[in-house]
């Protein structure tokens, strides 16, 4: 029991530290070492997890993935929602989460600091997969032109708005978030699950996962940290996608995954999991996904 409490306490400290760092910096995309991919880590540990993965049968929140793509050719002819939440702080975070890949790409083109920092990632993608790169760039440029209010190409968006909701305060106030994480994690989870599903893909959603990874090791009957971390990561992504987050061709999560590893480029997250993971690994992701449904008390 003492060991479990220690682990949970360490996770809380890690989450708090990361959250405060995140709030103090411009959105950052770290360069990735491509020598060893997540998929390789999964494959190396897969045989250690469960001998009969085919027995894992779980329900999905929805039978088919939600299509959240924008048609690039017809972008000027369709209506795109401008306001996603009545709370300005929450609204700004939703926009950031939905379109941060466009912000990074546009800033990369115009800002010397970003150009230097992201040169390796973007140059590699543009060289190895120019059609993919150019298609996303065209999408982002059109989106920025049609919606200047998103401020996609600005790196100094400082909002002095005072939060007027519980979720807004969680996103805005690091000390309050820390207190809630320690004393009322259930309220944090409820606020996240009842918000725009794109927030389930944000860094802030990690506040709600303090015990998930520890539970997952028991569920998967594995102490392979790399394996359970990767399975948990894609289960969380899949969970957000099936709730309705943007996970299609032009989404941030799909583009960022491809940018970090060109072997993981896809049209949507469901396709990525089905094409890049083995049947046993997919079964584990579904098992972890089912645990998330229970973890957040989602009614199917």
Image (cartoon, rainbow, N blue to C red):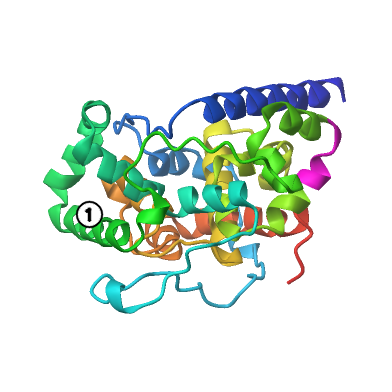
Query: 259 left or right of 81?
Result: left
Which SS type dominates the magenta stretch? Answer: helix
Which quarter of the picture shows residue 217? Answer: top right
Residue at image point 37% right, 34% down: 29
Query: Is 236 in the magenta?
Result: no
Residues in magenta, as a range: 183-188
Asked if residue 288 is positioned above or below residue 250 in the image, the reply reads: above
Query: Which residue is drawn at the image coordinates 48% and 49% (left, top)?
Result: 97
Viewer can see residue 148: yes
Image quarter hosting the C terminus: bottom right
Residue 162 position within the rendered picture, expressed as x and y whole percent measured from the top left? 67, 40
Q: Quadrant of the N terminus?
A: top right
Image quadrant assignment for residue 248: bottom left
Q: Let me know if residue 50 appears in the view.
A: no
Q: Nearer the viewer, residue 20 or 54?
A: 20
Q: Nearer the viewer, residue 73 or 84?
A: 84
């Amino acid at each position: 029991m003492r060991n479990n409490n220690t682990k949970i306490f360490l996770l809380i400290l890690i989450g708090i530290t990361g959250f405060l760092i995140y709030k103090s910096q411009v959105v950052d995309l770290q360069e990735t070492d491509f020598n060893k991919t997540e998929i390789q880590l999964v494959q190396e540990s897969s045989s250690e997890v469960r001998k009969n993965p085919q027995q894992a049968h779980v329900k999905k929140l929805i039978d088919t993935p939600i299509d959240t793509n924008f048609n690039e050719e017809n972008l000027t002819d369709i209506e795109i929602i401008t306001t996603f939440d009545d709370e300005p702080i929450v609204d700004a975070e939703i926009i950031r989460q939905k379109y941060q890949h466009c912000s990074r790409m546009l800033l990369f083109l115009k800002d010397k600091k970003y150009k230097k920092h992201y040169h390796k990632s973007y140059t590699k993608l543009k060289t190895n997969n120019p059609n993919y790169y150019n298609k996303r760039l065209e999408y982002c440029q059109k989106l920025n032109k049609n919606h200047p209010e998103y401020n996609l190409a600005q790196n100094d968006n400082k909002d002095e708005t005072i939060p007027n909701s519980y979720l807004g305060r969680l996103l805005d106030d690091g000390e309050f978030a820390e207190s809630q994480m320690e004393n009322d994690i259930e309220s944090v989870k409820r606020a996240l699950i009842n918000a725009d599903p794109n927030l389930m893909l944000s860094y802030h959603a990690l506040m709600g996962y303090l015990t998930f990874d520890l539970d997952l090791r028991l569920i998967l009957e594995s102490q392979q940290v790399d394996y359970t971390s990767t399975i948990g990561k894609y289960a969380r992504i899949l969970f957000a996608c099936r709730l309705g987050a943007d996970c299609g061709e032009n989404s941030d999560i799909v583009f960022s995954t491809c940018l970090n590893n060109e072997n993981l480029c896809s049209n949507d997250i469901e396709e990525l999991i089905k094409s890049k993971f083995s049947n046993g690994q997919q079964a584990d992701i579904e098992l972890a996904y089912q645990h998330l449904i229970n973890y957040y008390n989602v009614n199917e």
